[in-house]
């Protein structure tokens, strides 16, 4: 069994068809990334990767362009990242990444999700030490050894590599994201990545069931309904 990580789109809208929520979250992230690093995708590799992921998740072009145009204007909201950690239903370890223009409001909203599901939000670092902050790439390829050699030659500190049904999945430290991606492109050429993300990946996973699972899904729904929440990571394996 491979390492458990969450699909980005699934993390954004776990139990609903709320496409508008997904579009809004991508739009906000693209805006912040473009405002911070510039709107030129040749110079802002983070923006380029984010736009590629947005397109793969079927975010309309007009949503992407609107966010970039907004960033070009130089005004608009001043969003900043915020990260919260805690133990959710079933004692699941949870990390919640947000973009907010009002940290006090966002903290209160996230804390309420914990409170309403009889859980408690924790302090920074309370669970993140049980996760790896990993760059993850999954793509069609058959030669795992050739891929591993190319990454090692590029001085990428490969955490793990898996091969299953003609798919290869590479895990590397978050700091090696761009270096690893370029090494893969150099050895293969243009790649249609099935997964191309940076995530918090749990070092150990667990399963829950029954009432605990139902309450955890309610917890995810409540978090996903918050506009400021961008991504949710946890140690449960569904």
Image: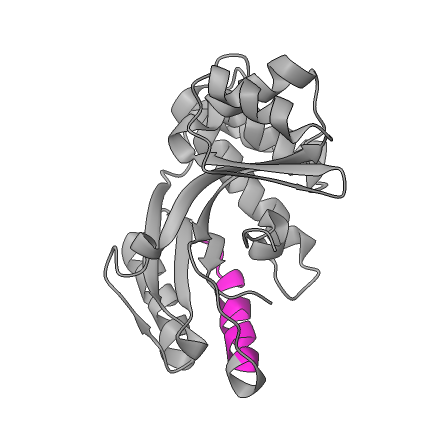
Main secondary structure found in the magenta portion: helix
- What residue is drawn where x is 48% and y is 13%? 43
Q: Is 116 located above or below residue 103 in the figure?
A: below
Count all numbered tags in the image, as a single digit: 0
Q: How is the image coloured?
A: one colour
Quarter of the image that includes the C terminus:
bottom right
Image-quadrant location for residue 92: bottom left
Which residue, as the protein is rendered here, is positioned at the far right? 165
Decide whether residue 224 is among the magenta residues.
yes
In-image side of 129 versus 2 (left or right) = left
Which residue, as the protein is rendered here, is positioned at the far front? 145
Q: Is 225 located above or below residue 187 in the figure?
A: below
Q: Is 176 located above or below residue 195 in the figure?
A: above
Q: Is residue 223 among the parts visible in the rendering?
A: yes
Q: How far across and how far down the image is residue 101, in percent?
A: 35, 47
Q: Is residue 69 among the parts visible in the rendering?
A: no
- What residue is drawn where x is 52% and y is 33%? 30
Q: How far across and how far down the image is residue 28, in percent?
A: 50, 41
In-image side of 131 versus 177 (left or right) = left
- What residue is drawn where x is 35% and y is 58%? 106
Residue closest to the eye, 96 or 60: 96
- The magenta-colored residue range is 213-229
In-image side of 210 versus 36 (left or right) = right
Q: How far across and how far down the image is residue 56, in percent?
A: 70, 37
Decide whether residue 82 is among the magenta residues.
no
Residue closest to the eye, 108 or 85: 85
Residue closest to the eye, 40 or 14: 14
Q: How far across and how far down the image is residue 197, in percent?
A: 54, 38
Quarter of the image that includes the N terminus:
bottom right
Image-quadrant location for residue 68: top right
Image-quadrant location for residue 136: top right
């Amino acid at each position: 069994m491979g390492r458990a990580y969450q699909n980005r789109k699934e993390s954004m809208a776990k139990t609903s068809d709320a496409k508008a929520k997904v579009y809004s979250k991508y739009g906000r992230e693209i805006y912040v990334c473009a405002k911070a690093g510039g709107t030129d995708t040749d110079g802002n590799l983070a923006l380029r990767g984010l736009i590629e992921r947005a397109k793969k998740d079927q975010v309309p072009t007009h949503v992407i362009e609107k966010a970039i145009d907004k960033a070009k204007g130089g005004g608009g909201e001043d969003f900043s990242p915020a990260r919260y950690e805690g133990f959710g239903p079933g004692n699941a370890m949870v990390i919640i990444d947000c973009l907010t223009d009002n940290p006090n409001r966002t903290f209160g909203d996230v804390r309420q999700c914990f409170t309403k599901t009889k859980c408690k939000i924790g302090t920074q670092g309370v669970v993140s030490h049980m996760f790896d902050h990993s760059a993850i790439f999954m793509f069609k390829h058959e030669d795992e050894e050739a891929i591993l050699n190319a990454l090692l030659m590029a001085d990428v500190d490969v955490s793990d590599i898996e091969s299953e049904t003609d798919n290869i999945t590479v895990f590397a430290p978050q700091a090696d994201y761009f270096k690893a991606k370029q090494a893969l492109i150099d050895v293969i050429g243009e790649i249609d990545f099935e997964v191309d993300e940076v995530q918090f990946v749990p070092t150990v996973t667990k399963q829950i069931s029954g009432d605990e699972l139902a309450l955890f899904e309610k917890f995810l729904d409540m978090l996903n309904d918050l506009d400021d929440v961008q991504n949710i990571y946890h140690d449960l394996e569904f």
